[in-house]
Amino acid sequence: MQGAPYQQTVETRGIPEAIDSNASLDTLASNTKYREALRRKLPTVEPLLADLFDRDGYYSIQRKIEQGKDLTFDESFGLVTFVCAALNKPLREELRGKLKNFMPEDTHLLQATALLSAMSTKEAYVGLTAEEIAGMVAGTIHLDTVVRTKYDGPVVAFGGMGGDKGYPLNSHTTKLFSLSTLSAIALSADGPVHKHHSYPNTSKVAGQSAIEAFGARSDFHTPESFERVLEEANVLMSSCHNTRTLHSLSHKLKGETVNHVIGPLSFTMSSDTPLHAMIGVNEKIHPSVIVDAMRILSEKGFQSYDNSAVYCGTLIANDDTKILDPSLMKHVVVLDEVAPPPYRTIVSFLVGGENAGAYVLSPEDFYDPKDLADFSPSSLAIPNTKESIIEANVSAIEGKDITRVKYLAMTVGLGLFVRQHLNDPSSLDRTKMRVNRDMLRACTKHGLELILSGKGKEQLERYVTITNQFAGGGVL
């Protein structure tokens, strides 16, 4: 990838320093002995690559998609392996001689683009299955990701699909601020947090650009750096541009593919680190489908998921029973985040390795109505410019705008609820399909206190300092 933001110059302790995502990925791959690890891993997953090795390669998978059929986990694993190999040179070289109908690099790239486009079309018009999503994620984290950080104990892990359409309180040119990124920072004051993100593709600001605007770094060059940042800051934000090749294809195409579905689940944490996932989805994927994909990934050993939540914000401001109808998702879902008051949030929970079903959260599940009296929706009408979104990020994490702070605390509260309460049978009423309001309100109150007390800002400053210490050729 060429040009900003993939290549940029920053000042480190007053000294200009060039950062290149491409070089960072190459250096990290070398320091993790990625090629040697790949040679060990490939033989263990050969049964999943039968379409590539034993059948017609690209044509086997392409034919099934064109016939309108769903792919199996194995076929989806093979699809993403084939796609990644178009950009991942070590993977391509290891597959050389094994792939049926192996083509020159230019043709391979065209075929990879066609597969991603076909799956993107399927997502839009038919829908992706949990098996398809799990297979693509498994292939990405197992074969294309060059580092996976181990942590002893559960970690809250944030991911989001993007796709903010805006609310009636906004004009079509407004956006919300960086909720999941700031929530990860604030929540890290209570326990370990991971977030995997990227630079913006179709929006003005994405997670990586948001955190780097505060002065943080993302270019870690050794596995020890990742571990030390998480250990010392209690939060680790890794970049898809520095840790794998898959997302580069979408950015080369300058448009969305199914990478926005794969990325939020493709964490750079080790397969045996239990994750409390907090995943935001768009209108094309029902939260329960992602919960089922997480269950499959856990069962197959590619990623360990502890109790988790998958959610999206809707246009519905009342208790409309139609809100949970999957066929109406495209009409009611406008945000891959918790919805701001007065709107409802759809959330599905993974509890004890099982899909606990879909629930509707109202603003009153997070706050007593009197606590919403000073909530001003106009504070959330943020112009869709980099400068305006970054300014809103600052005002939220520093506690300067009470509406933004209260809205941010809702996601932090949900994260605390998932981490602390989902093992309690009384946390969910599975008959009425309601969450325990008292528990969620208490968690949201605690989240609000973390921000207003200044602990969120302290965590942000801590993260900036520590990432600058360990980024690039930083000391260990």
Image (spheres, rainbow, N blue to C red):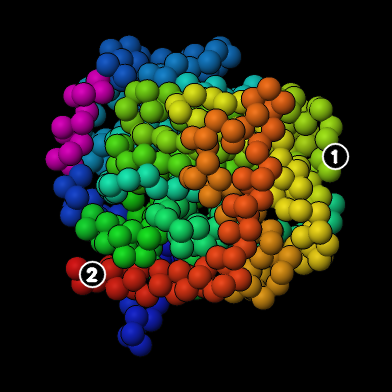
Is residue 229 at least partly visible in the picture?
A: yes
Q: Nearer the viewer, residue 72 or 271?
A: 271
Amino acid type at image mark 1: Asn
Residue placed most toward the observer, 354 or 91: 354
**335 relative position to 449: left or right:** right
Give the quadrant of the N terminus: bottom left
Nearer the camera: disc 1 or disc 2: 1
- Residue 180 image offset from top left, x and y in percent: 56, 54
Q: Relative to 204, is 95 above or below? A: above
Q: Earlier in the sequence, mark 1 or mark 2?
A: 1
Magenta region, residue range: 35-46
In the picture, the disc for residue 473 is 2
Mark 1 to mark 2: distance in Å? 53 Å
Crowdedness near tag 2: few (<14), some (14–19) or many (≥20) residues, C-alpha within 10 Å: few
Query: Which residue type carries mark 2?
Result: Gly
Q: Looking at the image, can residue 120 be seen?
A: no
* Residue depicted at 59% across the width and 36% down the height: 427
Tell me the residue at 48%/41% (across/down). Answer: 277
* Kind of element beneath mark 2: loop
Residue 445 to residue 124: above or below: below
Q: Find out whether the residues at labels 1 and 2 contact each other: C-beta distance under 8 Å.
A: no
**Where in the figure is residue 474, as x and y percent of width and height?**
24, 71
- Label ID, residue 318: 1
**Residue shown at the point (65%, 39%) measured from the top left:** 436
* Front in this rendered view, residue 67 or 404: 404
Relative side of 41 to 78, left or right: left
